Image (cartoon, rainbow, N blue to C red):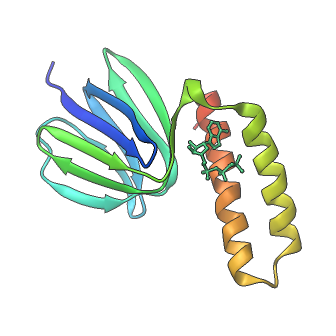
Amino acid sequence: MKTVKVSVVTPDGPVYDSEVEMVSVRATSGELGILPGHIPLVAPLAISAVRLKKDGKTEYIAVSGGFLEVRPDQVTILAQSAELASDIDVERALRAKERAEQRVNQQRTEHTDFRRAELALQRAINRLAVSEKKF
Ligand code: ATP
């Protein structure tokens, strides 16, 4: 089966490097499925799960947005943070979710902090979903 190389990179270093059969991402414009030989493209990503099909199994990575670059033989994802499902600390994400929920509820009048709290909430919810592989 044909494969495409996928690299997921964060400021802390590489998180994932492997040949896969298919990559699915959520760009801000919608879902994208990428197979080997895909035409080149660049797209901003939503806070979401990256799904990687490898040897018939699916692996999940939580990304906090970032950018996708597709070339026919290489897919690169650059994100501020990215965690493999198995590396997600569920307790930490639950605590982050609780904190963010409190801030979202308190700061409806303060636009900047509200947005920040909302993004923190989305990251926590995304991590919890990826850790449970629920979509
Ligand atoms: P927290 O408030 O728990 O730090 P956060 O959403 O503010 O959550 P980020 O700023 O997105 O955290 O990430 C900071 C670093 O911590 C990144 O390297 C990220 O991969 C890691 N990280 C954050 N939350 C988790 C988690 N629940 N499990 C594993 N790693 C995490």
Can the viewer see residue 11 in this picture? yes
In the visual, does 72 lie left or right of 25?
A: left
- Write down the quadrant of residue 2 in the picture: top left
Farthest residue toward the front?
12
Image quarter for ligand 1? top right
Which residue appears at 42% of the width and 63% of the height?
28
Q: Percent x, y for residue 23?
A: 32, 37
Which residue appears at 48% of the width and 31% of the height?
60
**Can you say which quadrant of the picture contains the N terminus?**
top left
Work out whether 91 lies above or below 76. Answer: above
Which residue appears at 55% of the width and 29% of the height?
85
- Between 96 and 70, the one nearer to me in the picture: 96
In the visual, does 25 lie left or right of 118?
A: left
**Can you say which quadrant of the picture contains the C terminus?**
top right
- Write down the quadrant of residue 3 in the picture: top left
Farthest residue toward the top?
55
In the visual, does 33 lie left or right of 45?
A: left
Can the viewer see residue 134 in this picture? no
Q: Percent x, y for residue 95?
A: 81, 44
Figure label count: 0
Which residue appears at 80% of the width and 67% of the height?
104
Work out whether 69 lies above or below 35. Answer: below
